[in-house]
Image (cartoon, helix red, strand yellow):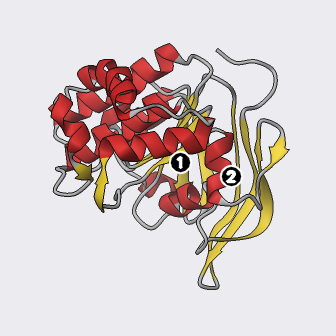
């Protein structure tokens, strides 16, 4: 489901961390409604790319640019990108003691859309999404990510994505540390968000092929040593599963 104008475009992106170049010229275009999977071994630059896309302060763009819905967002701060409709689910979500899930969602929704719902209104609004993600309704009263299992953290991020309704989502190692049942629930949650918002573009960053069995990508890219060295369809992920990354080194 693609329209002619790109949703998100990465052009010749070079990124350095503490003076060391990690990304060495990345090009990638996501059209509306597409799911792209970016795969690579540890240390290939996957998480650096995720953080650079959302404007992480420790990630210096030394060349290239990022275009979101046709606008150059390379210099935009993280909060401005979020308000504009970009979303990042982190590999290691941070704990926020003293802030409940429901309060966090309320504040995030206000910042993203200027919508100021009461706690009760928001609780009613998220019930269906929580049900889809096999989440207990009492989950909303827990402090954000405090004492959460890996699966609970990932479900919470997909819940945030469902409520905030971004236009473009970056899912960084969303499948990391999940057992097969939790993986299926998270993948189903992403698919249902996409069903509700068919124009949503997704960049799924992963080390493993297994989530792609449940979340079919339109395109697969292989990142090695800060460069995309190959791109193709879902069959590329299957080849990676069989051959490993050595064939591309």
Quarter location, residue 154 = top left
Label 1 to label 2, Cα distance in Å? 29 Å
Secondary structure beneath label 1: strand
Q: Residues within 10 Å of mark 2 (few under 14, many from 20)?
A: some
Viewer-nearest of discs 1 and 2: 2
Q: Which mark is residue 222?
A: 1
Q: Nearer the viewer, residue 249 or 16?
A: 16
At 30% across and 32% down in the image, what residue appears?
A: 186
- The location of residue 206, given as percent across then percent down, is 41, 47
Residue 5, above or below 170: above
- The location of residue 25, given as percent across then percent down, is 72, 61
| 216 left or right of 61 in image | left
Q: Nearer the viewer, residue 221 or 126?
A: 126
Quarter location, residue 97 = bottom left
Secondary structure beneath label 2: helix
Disc with the residue nearer the chain's start (1 vs 2): 2
At 44% across and 40% down in the image, what residue appears?
A: 106
At 61% across and 22% down in the image, what residue appears?
A: 33
Task: Tell me if label 1 and label 2 are in contact, CB under 8 Å.
Answer: no
Residue 140, above or below 218: below
Q: Nearer the viewer, residue 116 or 92?
A: 116
- The location of residue 134, given as percent across then percent down, is 20, 26
Q: Quadrant of the N terminus?
A: top right
Residue that label 2 marks:
80
Residue 46, above or below 128: below
The answer to whether any part of residue 31 appears in the image is yes
| 35 left or right of 12 in image | left
Residue 13, above or below 19: above
């Amino acid at each position: 489901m693609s329209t002619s104008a790109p949703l998100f475009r990465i052009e010749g992106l070079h990124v350095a961390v503490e003076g060391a170049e990690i990304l060495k010229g990345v090009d990638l275009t996501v059209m509306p409604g597409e799911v792209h999977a970016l795969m690579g071994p540890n240390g290939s630059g996957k998480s650096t790319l995720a953080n650079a896309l959302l404007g992480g302060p420790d990630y210096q763009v030394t060349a290239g640019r990022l275009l979101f819905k046709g606008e150059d967002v390379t210099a935009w701060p993280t909060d401005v990108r979020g308000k504009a409709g970009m979303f990042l689910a982190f590999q290691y979500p941070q704990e926020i003691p003293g802030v409940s899930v429901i309060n966090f969602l309320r504040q995030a929704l206000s910042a993203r859309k200027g919508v100021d719902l009461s706690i009760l209104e928001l609780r009613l609004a998220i019930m269906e999404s929580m049900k889809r993600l096999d989440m207990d309704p009492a989950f909303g009263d827990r402090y954000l990510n405090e004492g959460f299992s890996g699966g609970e953290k990932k479900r919470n991020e997909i819940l945030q994505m469902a409520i905030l309704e971004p236009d473009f989502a970056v899912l960084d190692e969303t499948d990391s540390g999940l057992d097969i049942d939790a993986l299926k629930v998270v993948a189903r949650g992403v698919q249902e968000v996409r069903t509700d918002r068919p124009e949503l573009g997704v960049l799924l960053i992963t080390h493993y092929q297994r989530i792609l069995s449940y979340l079919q990508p339109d395109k697969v890219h292989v990142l090695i040593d800060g460069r995309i060295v190959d791109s193709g369809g879902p069959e590329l992920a299957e080849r990676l599963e069989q051959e490993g990354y050595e064939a591309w080194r």
